[in-house]
Protein backbone atom coordinates (compact mmCIF):
# COMPACT_ATOMS: atom_id res chain seq x y z
CA UNK A 1 0.00 0.00 0.00
CA UNK A 2 1.67 3.24 -1.12
CA UNK A 3 0.93 6.48 0.71
CA UNK A 4 0.34 8.21 -2.56
CA UNK A 5 0.94 11.90 -2.28
CA UNK A 6 2.60 12.22 1.08
CA UNK A 7 5.62 14.50 0.97
CA UNK A 8 8.77 13.66 2.91
CA UNK A 9 11.67 16.00 3.64
CA UNK A 10 14.97 14.12 3.67
CA UNK A 11 17.84 16.05 5.26
CA UNK A 12 21.25 14.88 4.09
CA UNK A 13 19.49 13.09 1.24
CA UNK A 14 22.49 13.33 -1.12
CA UNK A 15 24.58 11.18 1.24
CA UNK A 16 25.22 7.44 1.24
CA UNK A 17 22.19 6.21 3.20
CA UNK A 18 20.10 9.19 2.09
CA UNK A 19 20.30 8.46 -1.64
CA UNK A 20 19.40 4.79 -1.24
CA UNK A 21 16.46 5.71 1.01
CA UNK A 22 15.23 8.46 -1.34
CA UNK A 23 15.17 5.97 -4.22
CA UNK A 24 13.04 3.54 -2.17
CA UNK A 25 10.71 6.37 -1.06
CA UNK A 26 10.08 7.35 -4.68
CA UNK A 27 9.38 3.72 -5.60
CA UNK A 28 6.89 3.52 -2.71
CA UNK A 29 4.92 6.49 -4.08
CA UNK A 30 6.15 9.32 -1.85
CA UNK A 31 7.06 12.82 -2.96
CA UNK A 32 10.53 13.71 -1.72
CA UNK A 33 12.41 16.95 -1.07
CA UNK A 34 16.10 16.73 -0.23
CA UNK A 35 18.01 19.41 1.65
CA UNK A 36 21.79 18.90 1.72
CA UNK A 37 24.79 21.21 2.05
CA UNK A 38 27.00 18.77 0.05
CA UNK A 39 29.62 18.91 2.81
CA UNK A 40 30.37 15.19 2.40
CA UNK A 41 28.34 14.40 -0.72
CA UNK A 42 27.83 15.51 -4.33
CA UNK A 43 24.79 16.42 -6.42
CA UNK A 44 25.74 13.78 -8.99
CA UNK A 45 24.49 11.20 -6.45
CA UNK A 46 21.01 12.76 -6.67
CA UNK A 47 21.23 12.69 -10.48
CA UNK A 48 21.92 8.94 -10.25
CA UNK A 49 18.83 8.52 -8.06
CA UNK A 50 16.78 10.25 -10.78
CA UNK A 51 18.32 7.98 -13.42
CA UNK A 52 17.44 4.84 -11.44
CA UNK A 53 13.94 6.08 -10.55
CA UNK A 54 13.13 6.97 -14.17
CA UNK A 55 11.55 10.16 -15.59
CA UNK A 56 8.06 9.70 -14.12
CA UNK A 57 9.11 9.17 -10.49
CA UNK A 58 11.87 11.79 -10.78
CA UNK A 59 9.18 14.44 -11.16
CA UNK A 60 8.38 13.77 -7.49
CA UNK A 61 11.93 14.58 -6.35
CA UNK A 62 13.26 18.05 -5.51
CA UNK A 63 16.80 18.92 -4.46
CA UNK A 64 17.60 22.02 -2.37
CA UNK A 65 21.13 23.13 -1.58
CA UNK A 66 20.89 24.32 2.01
CA UNK A 67 22.29 24.04 5.52
CA UNK A 68 20.25 23.21 8.61
CA UNK A 69 22.40 25.63 10.60
CA UNK A 70 20.86 28.41 8.52
CA UNK A 71 17.27 28.84 9.70
CA UNK A 72 16.42 30.86 6.60
CA UNK A 73 17.13 27.83 4.40
CA UNK A 74 14.66 25.79 6.46
CA UNK A 75 12.09 28.58 6.68
CA UNK A 76 12.11 28.92 2.89
CA UNK A 77 11.61 25.19 2.43
CA UNK A 78 8.77 24.78 4.95
CA UNK A 79 6.95 27.92 3.80
CA UNK A 80 6.84 26.57 0.22
CA UNK A 81 5.94 22.91 0.87
CA UNK A 82 3.75 21.10 3.37
CA UNK A 83 5.76 18.14 4.65
CA UNK A 84 4.03 15.10 6.15
CA UNK A 85 7.19 13.82 7.83
CA UNK A 86 10.95 14.34 8.00
CA UNK A 87 13.73 11.78 7.74
CA UNK A 88 16.75 13.42 9.34
CA UNK A 89 20.10 12.06 8.09
CA UNK A 90 22.11 15.29 7.91
CA UNK A 91 25.22 15.38 10.07
CA UNK A 92 28.92 14.63 10.27
CA UNK A 93 29.66 10.99 11.03
CA UNK A 94 33.35 10.11 11.51
CA UNK A 95 34.27 8.90 15.00
CA UNK A 96 38.01 9.65 14.72
CA UNK A 97 37.46 13.09 13.23
CA UNK A 98 35.00 13.97 16.00
CA UNK A 99 37.69 13.33 18.63
CA UNK A 100 39.96 15.87 16.89
CA UNK A 101 37.25 18.43 16.01
CA UNK A 102 34.52 18.12 18.67
CA UNK A 103 33.21 21.68 18.27
CA UNK A 104 32.71 21.14 14.54
CA UNK A 105 30.59 18.08 15.36
CA UNK A 106 28.53 19.85 18.03
CA UNK A 107 27.96 22.80 15.69
CA UNK A 108 26.90 20.67 12.71
CA UNK A 109 24.95 17.91 14.39
CA UNK A 110 23.33 19.67 17.35
CA UNK A 111 22.60 23.18 16.12
CA UNK A 112 21.35 21.98 12.72
CA UNK A 113 18.97 19.50 14.37
CA UNK A 114 17.63 21.97 16.93
CA UNK A 115 16.87 24.44 14.12
CA UNK A 116 15.10 21.69 12.19
CA UNK A 117 12.91 20.72 15.17
CA UNK A 118 11.98 24.36 15.82
CA UNK A 119 10.88 24.90 12.22
CA UNK A 120 9.04 21.55 12.14
CA UNK A 121 7.08 22.58 15.25
CA UNK A 122 6.32 26.01 13.79
CA UNK A 123 4.84 24.44 10.64
CA UNK A 124 3.12 21.65 12.58
CA UNK A 125 5.14 18.85 10.96
CA UNK A 126 5.55 16.52 13.93
CA UNK A 127 6.56 13.17 12.47
CA UNK A 128 10.28 12.40 12.52
CA UNK A 129 12.53 9.47 11.64
CA UNK A 130 15.94 10.24 13.14
CA UNK A 131 19.21 8.76 12.03
CA UNK A 132 20.81 7.67 15.30
CA UNK A 133 23.68 5.23 15.70
CA UNK A 134 24.90 2.18 17.58
CA UNK A 135 27.61 4.47 18.99
CA UNK A 136 25.03 5.45 21.65
CA UNK A 137 25.71 2.05 23.27
CA UNK A 138 29.38 2.99 23.82
CA UNK A 139 31.33 -0.07 25.00
CA UNK A 140 28.32 -2.28 25.82
CA UNK A 141 28.64 -4.46 28.91
CA UNK A 142 26.99 -7.32 27.09
CA UNK A 143 25.96 -8.08 23.53
CA UNK A 144 23.74 -8.13 21.55
CA UNK A 145 22.72 -4.51 22.19
CA UNK A 146 19.10 -4.18 23.29
CA UNK A 147 17.26 -0.86 22.87
CA UNK A 148 16.66 -0.37 26.60
CA UNK A 149 20.35 -0.72 27.55
CA UNK A 150 21.86 2.16 29.46
CA UNK A 151 23.27 4.54 26.86
CA UNK A 152 26.81 5.87 26.92
CA UNK A 153 28.85 7.46 24.17
CA UNK A 154 32.63 7.04 23.94
CA UNK A 155 33.39 9.90 21.55
CA UNK A 156 32.01 13.31 20.48
CA UNK A 157 30.21 11.89 17.42
CA UNK A 158 28.41 9.33 19.58
CA UNK A 159 27.63 12.04 22.12
CA UNK A 160 25.93 14.17 19.45
CA UNK A 161 23.67 11.22 18.60
CA UNK A 162 23.00 10.57 22.28
CA UNK A 163 22.20 14.26 22.97
CA UNK A 164 19.90 14.34 19.94
CA UNK A 165 18.05 11.23 21.14
CA UNK A 166 17.56 12.90 24.54
CA UNK A 167 16.42 16.14 22.89
CA UNK A 168 13.87 14.19 20.81
CA UNK A 169 12.56 12.43 23.95
CA UNK A 170 12.24 15.77 25.77
CA UNK A 171 10.37 17.38 22.84
CA UNK A 172 7.90 14.49 22.69
CA UNK A 173 7.39 14.54 26.48
CA UNK A 174 6.51 18.23 26.29
CA UNK A 175 4.19 17.83 23.29
CA UNK A 176 2.56 14.44 22.74
CA UNK A 177 1.51 15.36 19.18
CA UNK A 178 5.04 14.44 18.08
CA UNK A 179 5.68 10.96 16.75
CA UNK A 180 9.38 10.10 16.60
CA UNK A 181 11.32 7.00 15.64
CA UNK A 182 15.04 6.87 16.42
CA UNK A 183 16.85 4.36 14.21
CA UNK A 184 20.14 3.14 15.66
CA UNK A 185 22.17 1.99 12.69
CA UNK A 186 24.98 -0.42 13.12
CA UNK A 187 27.59 -0.41 10.29
CA UNK A 188 26.06 0.47 6.90
CA UNK A 189 27.88 -1.03 3.91
CA UNK A 190 27.16 -2.32 0.41
CA UNK A 191 25.64 -0.35 -2.45
CA UNK A 192 22.66 -0.35 -4.82
CA UNK A 193 22.62 -3.55 -6.87
CA UNK A 194 22.88 -1.53 -10.12
CA UNK A 195 26.36 -0.32 -9.12
CA UNK A 196 25.21 3.27 -9.77
CA UNK A 197 24.81 4.38 -6.12
CA UNK A 198 27.28 3.85 -3.30
CA UNK A 199 29.40 5.43 -0.63
CA UNK A 200 31.79 8.11 -1.88
CA UNK A 201 33.43 9.86 1.06
CA UNK A 202 35.53 12.95 0.43
CA UNK A 203 39.19 12.44 1.41
CA UNK A 204 40.57 9.27 3.03
CA UNK A 205 37.63 7.16 4.23
CA UNK A 206 36.99 6.83 7.95
CA UNK A 207 35.08 3.58 7.82
CA UNK A 208 36.04 0.12 6.70
CA UNK A 209 34.32 -0.67 3.40
CA UNK A 210 35.07 2.52 1.43
CA UNK A 211 38.65 2.13 2.63
CA UNK A 212 38.80 -1.50 1.41
CA UNK A 213 37.27 -0.55 -1.95
CA UNK A 214 39.80 2.26 -2.49
CA UNK A 215 42.63 -0.21 -1.87
CA UNK A 216 40.97 -2.70 -4.27
CA UNK A 217 40.81 -0.15 -7.11
CA UNK A 218 44.36 1.08 -6.49
CA UNK A 219 43.56 4.49 -4.98
CA UNK A 220 45.19 3.59 -1.65
CA UNK A 221 48.18 1.25 -1.17
CA UNK A 222 46.97 -0.70 1.87
CA UNK A 223 44.23 -0.99 4.46
CA UNK A 224 45.00 0.20 7.97
CA UNK A 225 43.42 -2.22 10.45
CA UNK A 226 43.05 -0.36 13.73
CA UNK A 227 43.48 -2.76 16.62
CA UNK A 228 44.73 -6.35 16.31
CA UNK A 229 44.86 -7.21 20.01
CA UNK A 230 41.16 -7.06 20.87
CA UNK A 231 39.81 -10.01 22.88
CA UNK A 232 38.08 -11.43 19.76
CA UNK A 233 38.63 -14.59 17.69
CA UNK A 234 41.19 -12.96 15.35
CA UNK A 235 42.14 -9.90 17.41
CA UNK A 236 40.28 -7.41 15.18
CA UNK A 237 37.18 -5.47 16.23
CA UNK A 238 33.75 -7.03 15.67
CA UNK A 239 30.86 -5.04 14.18
CA UNK A 240 27.37 -5.63 12.85
CA UNK A 241 27.56 -4.76 9.15
CA UNK A 242 24.24 -4.06 7.45
CA UNK A 243 23.45 -3.65 3.76
CA UNK A 244 22.42 -0.10 2.89
CA UNK A 245 19.34 -1.38 1.00
CA UNK A 246 18.17 -3.13 4.18
CA UNK A 247 18.63 0.19 6.00
CA UNK A 248 16.63 2.02 3.33
CA UNK A 249 13.80 -0.49 3.77
CA UNK A 250 14.01 0.05 7.54
CA UNK A 251 13.25 3.75 6.98
CA UNK A 252 10.17 2.90 4.90
CA UNK A 253 9.00 0.57 7.69
CA UNK A 254 9.57 3.35 10.26
CA UNK A 255 7.58 5.86 8.17
CA UNK A 256 4.69 3.42 7.84
CA UNK A 257 4.71 3.03 11.62
CA UNK A 258 4.62 6.84 12.09
CA UNK A 259 1.67 7.20 9.73
CA UNK A 260 -0.36 4.30 11.10
CA UNK A 261 0.29 4.27 14.86
CA UNK A 262 -1.32 6.79 17.19
CA UNK A 263 0.61 6.74 20.45
CA UNK A 264 4.09 5.91 19.27
CA UNK A 265 5.75 8.63 21.37
CA UNK A 266 9.50 8.60 20.85
CA UNK A 267 10.79 5.08 20.25
CA UNK A 268 14.23 3.68 19.37
CA UNK A 269 14.90 0.68 17.13
CA UNK A 270 18.13 -1.08 16.22
CA UNK A 271 18.77 -1.59 12.52
CA UNK A 272 21.36 -4.33 12.26
CA UNK A 273 21.60 -7.99 11.25
CA UNK A 274 22.19 -9.35 14.74
CA UNK A 275 25.44 -10.95 13.56
CA UNK A 276 28.93 -9.78 14.51
CA UNK A 277 31.68 -9.91 11.86
CA UNK A 278 35.33 -9.08 12.51
CA UNK A 279 37.27 -6.59 10.40
CA UNK A 280 39.57 -9.35 9.11
CA UNK A 281 36.59 -11.58 8.21
CA UNK A 282 35.12 -8.70 6.23
CA UNK A 283 38.44 -8.20 4.40
CA UNK A 284 38.56 -11.90 3.48
CA UNK A 285 34.94 -11.83 2.22
CA UNK A 286 35.64 -8.75 0.11
CA UNK A 287 38.78 -10.38 -1.36
CA UNK A 288 36.64 -13.35 -2.39
CA UNK A 289 33.91 -11.15 -3.93
CA UNK A 290 36.36 -8.96 -5.85
CA UNK A 291 39.16 -11.38 -6.68
CA UNK A 292 41.55 -8.69 -5.38
CA UNK A 293 44.18 -9.06 -2.67
CA UNK A 294 43.85 -6.36 0.00
CA UNK A 295 47.23 -5.63 1.64
CA UNK A 296 46.73 -4.75 5.30
CA UNK A 297 48.78 -2.86 7.85
CA UNK A 298 48.09 -3.63 11.51
CA UNK A 299 47.86 -0.39 13.50
CA UNK A 300 47.18 0.47 17.15
CA UNK A 301 43.57 0.79 18.30
CA UNK A 302 41.80 4.09 17.66
CA UNK A 303 40.62 6.19 20.58
CA UNK A 304 36.93 5.64 21.26
CA UNK A 305 36.54 2.33 19.38
CA UNK A 306 34.64 -0.50 21.11
CA UNK A 307 35.72 -4.18 20.97
CA UNK A 308 32.51 -5.81 19.76
CA UNK A 309 29.10 -4.37 18.99
CA UNK A 310 26.13 -6.07 17.35
CA UNK A 311 22.39 -5.63 17.47
CA UNK A 312 19.46 -7.37 18.99
CA UNK A 313 16.96 -7.14 16.12
CA UNK A 314 13.89 -8.49 17.91
CA UNK A 315 12.13 -5.17 18.54
CA UNK A 316 12.36 -3.95 14.91
CA UNK A 317 11.17 -7.36 13.66
CA UNK A 318 8.21 -7.38 16.02
CA UNK A 319 7.10 -3.73 15.88
CA UNK A 320 8.23 -2.54 12.44
CA UNK A 321 7.90 -5.85 10.62
CA UNK A 322 11.45 -5.31 9.34
CA UNK A 323 14.33 -7.76 9.11
CA UNK A 324 17.68 -7.50 7.30
CA UNK A 325 17.75 -9.73 4.21
CA UNK A 326 21.36 -9.49 3.04
CA UNK A 327 24.47 -11.28 4.33
CA UNK A 328 28.11 -10.13 4.18
CA UNK A 329 28.67 -11.90 0.83
CA UNK A 330 25.98 -9.76 -0.85
CA UNK A 331 27.27 -6.65 0.93
CA UNK A 332 30.77 -7.24 -0.47
CA UNK A 333 29.45 -8.20 -3.92
CA UNK A 334 27.44 -4.98 -4.26
CA UNK A 335 30.21 -2.87 -2.74
CA UNK A 336 32.63 -4.27 -5.34
CA UNK A 337 30.21 -3.70 -8.21
CA UNK A 338 29.92 -0.03 -7.20
CA UNK A 339 33.70 0.30 -6.68
CA UNK A 340 34.68 -1.39 -9.93
CA UNK A 341 32.21 0.68 -12.00
CA UNK A 342 33.04 3.91 -10.13
CA UNK A 343 36.68 3.71 -9.01
CA UNK A 344 36.68 7.47 -8.35
CA UNK A 345 33.21 7.51 -6.83
CA UNK A 346 30.84 9.96 -8.49
CA UNK A 347 33.69 11.67 -10.34
CA UNK A 348 34.67 10.14 -13.66
CA UNK A 349 38.36 10.73 -12.87
CA UNK A 350 40.49 12.35 -10.13
Image (cartoon, helix red, strand yellow):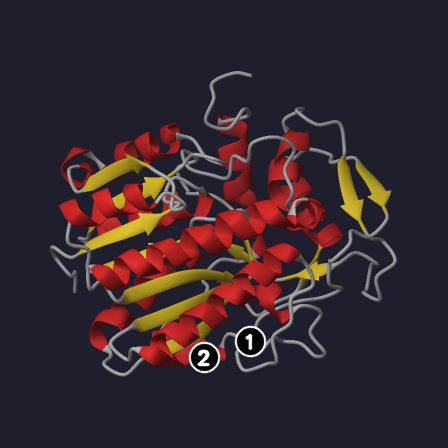
In depth, the one of 172 and 322 nearer the eye is: 172
**So how many labels did they put on this image?**
2
Q: Secondary structure at mark 2?
A: helix
What separation in Å lies between label 1 and label 2 (alpha carbons)?
8 Å
Query: Circle 2 sits on which residue?
Result: 315
Q: Secondary structure at mark 1?
A: loop
Residue 268 falls in image quadrant: bottom left
Query: Circle 1 sits on which residue?
Result: 312
Residue 104 falls in image quadrant: top right
Residue 43 is left or right of residue 53, and the answer is: right
In depth, the one of 299 and 336 nearer the eye is: 299
Q: Are marks 1 and 2 in contact (CB under 8 Å)?
A: yes
Furthest toward the left, the residue is 5
Of the 4 image quadrants, the one containing the N terminus is bottom left
Task: Give neighbour class at mark 1: few <14, some 14-19, many 20+ (Cα, 10 Å).
Answer: some
Q: Residue at left 43%, top 34%?
A: 38
Residue 278 horizontal/vertical position (percent): 72, 58
The answer to whether residue 331 is above or below residue 127 is: above
Amino acid sequence: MAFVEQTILVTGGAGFIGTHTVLQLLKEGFRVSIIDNLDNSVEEAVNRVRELAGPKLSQKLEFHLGDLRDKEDLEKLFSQTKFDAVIHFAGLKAVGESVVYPIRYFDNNLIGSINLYQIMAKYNCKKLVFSSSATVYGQPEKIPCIEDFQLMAMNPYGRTKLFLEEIARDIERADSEWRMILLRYFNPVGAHESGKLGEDPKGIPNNLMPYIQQVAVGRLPELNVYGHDYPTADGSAVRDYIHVMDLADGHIAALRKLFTTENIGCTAYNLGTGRGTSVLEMVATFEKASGKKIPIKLCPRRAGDATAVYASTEKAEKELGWKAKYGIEEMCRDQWKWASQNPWGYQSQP
